[in-house]
Amino acid sequence: MTNSGLQTTTIPLYLPDPHATLPQYADDEPAHDSFGRRINYLRISLTDRCNFRCVYCMPAVGTQFLPRPELLTTDELLLVVRAAAAAGFQKIRLTGGEPTLRPDLVEIVTAIKATPGITHVAMTTNALRLAKLAQPLKEAGLDRVNISIDTLDPAKFRQVTRGGKLDMVWEGIQAADQVGLHPIKLNAVVVRGLNDEEVPQLAALTLRYPWEMRFIEVMPLTGVADVAEDGVVKSEELIAQLEQIHGPLEDLGLAPTDSARRYRIPGAKGKLGFISAVSDPFCATCNRMRLTADGRLHLCLLRDNELDLRAAIRGGASQAQIEQLVRHAVAMKPWGHGLPEHVLPTLRGMSQLGG
Ligand code: SAM
Ligand code: SF4
């Protein structure tokens, strides 16, 4: 296969030379980036739409959603998954926007799970629709879920999500637990002055449930810079706050390629996780890449670099050609984000990237 036939159909957006002829990558070994990191985890945004409007994720008004023809179809999405698996990707996470808004979600999970080479399929969701979907998703082969929950106070929850109903989310969490989408991980983005006072209550869930409660430093993505600018609460501050209540936390360390440093409250059933992308970036062990709902490989969460797979697919590229493009995207992956130098992504918000 040569890449020359792809030049008119691929648009390596924001890559240094959009007209470069792609190198030919060996296709008999897993893809590594130019810094030697094995990239084997693809996070797929199934839609940019959402039934919440979390204040740290989307602006209150003005978000433009992709017209439906712009989204990858089920077949296009599954072609990318097969190509990524051929390039050595093993783990898939479905995200959004809100992935449960995608009508073909169960079908997508079934097909991804049946893809040779894919060993894990997980989903990140706000759980509003999970009470109904947990069972069919489990039967389709979904391995586990991460669920966003930023407070246990219904009024505060409505405020953070701009209208969300906490009881429905709680039912979704219980349903996921009952059908065995384990281990259940809960995500709270902590924003100073908004929900930082809720952290002890959220952490205390791990005394009762064998779940992992993870606290995420808010990131300054486009559309929410005003919330994020002064809102970051460093993980170390939260850990100190929790140690005042519970005494020293048991340090469970950082699993390789995991973004969360994990702790346990002495005697707790569950764990705590702290994701410190702002104060303590984990770029050195990054193993991931993202696929946007409109079919672009997004090379680093906090940078704008992308490579357009949809254009290649709609231009007739074969699976082998898409695999070469995936390998090229991996080779072009930046070392890390530029937050320390105040370089911020400008093109997409978190709801388009999926976290
Ligand atoms: N709608 C699903 C949900 O909320 O779980 C999936 C998409 S959401 C964009 C994925 C994750 O990104 C969630 O855990 C959410 O809390 C997190 N997130 C959203 N905006 C963020 C921000 N500005 N900084 C850090 N995490 C953010
Ligand atoms: Fe929607 Fe998730 Fe963003 Fe909240 S964090 S607005 S639930 S995509």
Image (cartoon, rainbow, N blue to C red):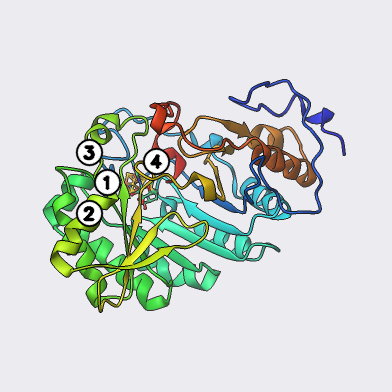
> What distance separates the C-alpha of mark 3 from that of mark 4?
18 Å
Task: Provide the residue designation for mark 3.
Answer: 231
* Location of residue 168 in the rendering, given as x and y in whole percent from the top left corner: 25, 62
Task: Provide the residue designation for mark 2.
Answer: 238
Mark 2 or mark 3, which is nearer the start of the sequence?
3
For numbered disc 1, what is the local secondary structure? loop
Can residue 104 be seen from the camera position used here?
no
Nearest to viewer (mark 4 / mark 1): 1
* Location of residue 29 in the rendering, given as x and y in whole percent from the top left corner: 77, 54
Say if disc 4 is inside 8 Å of ligand 2: yes
Mark 4 or mark 3, which is nearer the start of the sequence?
3
Residue 351 is tagged as: 4
> What distance separates the C-alpha of mark 4 from that of mark 2?
25 Å
The amino acid at mark 3 is Gly
| Labelled pair 1, 2 in contact (Cβ < 8 Å) | yes
Mark 1 or mark 4, which is nearer the start of the sequence?
1
Nearest to viewer (mark 4 / mark 2): 2
For numbered disc 4, what is the local secondary structure? helix
Residue 290 appears left or right of 224: right
Nearest to viewer (mark 3 / mark 4): 3
The amino acid at mark 4 is Ser
Task: Provide the residue designation for mark 1.
Answer: 234
For numbered disc 3, what is the local secondary structure? loop
* Location of residue 37 in the rendering, given as x and y in whole percent from the top left corner: 62, 48
The amino acid at mark 2 is Leu
Residue 178 appears left or right of 144: left
Compared to 102, does 72 lie above or below? Answer: above
> What distance separates the C-alpha of mark 1 from that of mark 3?
10 Å
Compared to 120, does 259 lie above or below? Answer: above
